[in-house]
Image: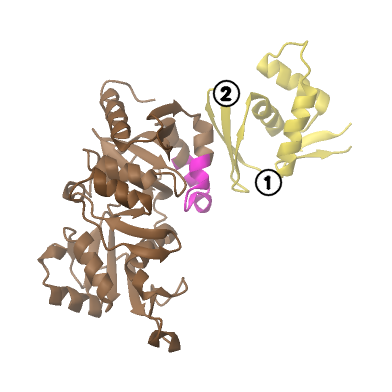
Chain colours: A brown, B yellow
Amino acid sequence: MILASLTDASLRRRLAEGDLVVRAGPFGYRIKSTLPPIADGLRVLYADYPLADPASFADFSLVMEPGAGIHRWWRPQVRFSTDGFYPFEPLPQSHAYPQLEWAMNWCVSTRAHQYLMLHAAVVERNGFAAVLAAPPGSGKSTLCAGLVHRGWRLLSDEIALVSLDGASITPAVRPISLKNKSIEVIGAFVPGAVFSRTTHGTSKGSVTHMKIPVSALDRMGETAVPRWVIFPKYVADAPAELVQRPRGHSVLELGSNSFNYTLLGLTGFEALTALVGASDCYQFSYGRLDDAVALFDRLADAALTEAPP
Amino acid sequence: MARWQLNELAVLHWRQWQDEWVIFDESSGQTLIADALMAASLMALEEGALSLTELEAQVRDDLQWPASEMLAPRIVTGLEFLSGLGLVRAENP
């Protein structure tokens, strides 16, 4: 059963009762909320996601509830909790949907220590995965969104789930987070792209989430082999260019952008160095998405005939 | 003369790609990157405490560095960096 098969009323009832369990990659997310933006956002972005039985185990339980207290009368708020724990301050209720996505990321990044988790997008072509690691504002998600609508498979937009032997990456398959100018860029690049309602005035500026291709969901159980570690950077009007980057420095950069590298200790070091050892590492700059996609396609084609590092 | 030694709690794990060494200290959880000179110094100290003179001779031999080139100042710079991380220290006899 997929989410789209629920009527509006049954979706809202399941949400109100905490009976909606969405499967995305290896995780089940139990979501409870009576807030209309949560139901609306899920209906747009998760329509094709499989639902688990309401009575089944879910890895994460998320409650998005209206804020309590006197504030609620003139500035309605949303509060996220999980297992009775409230990790964040309440936000304006207009931020409810992006807050849910951030909360889902938070649940994974603080708990899924069966993986080495890197703050990175991952896309795959011809069985080979490219880890796109970069700080916010570098154009990582824009590049990721462009690639997955030009034949690359999405594994992850925010959190790369690396096996502890570093040999495979598990899809997390969640909507792609876009903000500010990249919303317009991807809207023009992907005719017919489906977005959640844009939320303005968040700590990240204007944000939206983009629905991912169904083909990525069909393969959510299929891992990919790491082949490239790429640090992208959008540079206005720059040609698409890959420059080889030393592996040692790539280890340090990825480690410092990991959610649990330090926590995993030696296991994290072994996973990360195995991942980097099996990958060609590049700095990548681009100014036009079309050029970027063409260069990535050439990389993927060459990998079919070249021996891995 | 002071003798340099590895912190006795350090447990080092090594990876090498070309002229880069990535070192993980299991005790502190620190990861660092080293060039050949710093890596050779640290490897030598893993075997036991050495004076700067002994360390220089050992590193020069390991890396087959020309005798004409001064190594000691560069080794000291590396040792001071490693000392700041708590990985090595100088002990006076």
Secondary structure, mark 2, is loop
Residue identifier under label 1: B9
The quarter in which the N terminus of chain A is drawn is: bottom left
Q: Residues within 10 Å of mark 1 (few under 14, many from 20)?
A: few
Residue A250 position within the rendered picture, expressed as x and y whole percent measured from the top left: 49, 36
Secondary structure, mark 1, is loop
Q: Residue furthest front?
A: A237
Chain letter for mark 1:
B
Q: Which is closer to the viewer, label 2 or label 1?
A: 2
Q: Residue at x 89, y 31 (%)?
A: B1
Q: Is residue A264 magenta?
A: yes
Q: Which residues are magenta?
A: A253-271
Q: Is residue A10 above or below residue A117?
A: below
**Lower position in the chain sequence, tag 2 or tag 1:** 1
Chain letter for mark 2:
B
A164 vs A299, left or right, is: right
Residue A234 position within the rendered picture, expressed as x and y whole percent measured from the top left: 41, 39
Q: Is residue A146 magenta?
A: no
Kindly report the distance in space between the C-alpha atoms of the residues bearing marks 2 and 1: 27 Å
Residue A287 position within the rendered picture, expressed as x and y whole percent measured from the top left: 38, 35
Residue identifier under label 2: B19
Amino acid type assigned to the residue bearing label 1 in the image: Leu
Which residue is more in the foreground, A228 or A275? A228
> Within the image, what quadrant is residue A111 found in?
bottom left
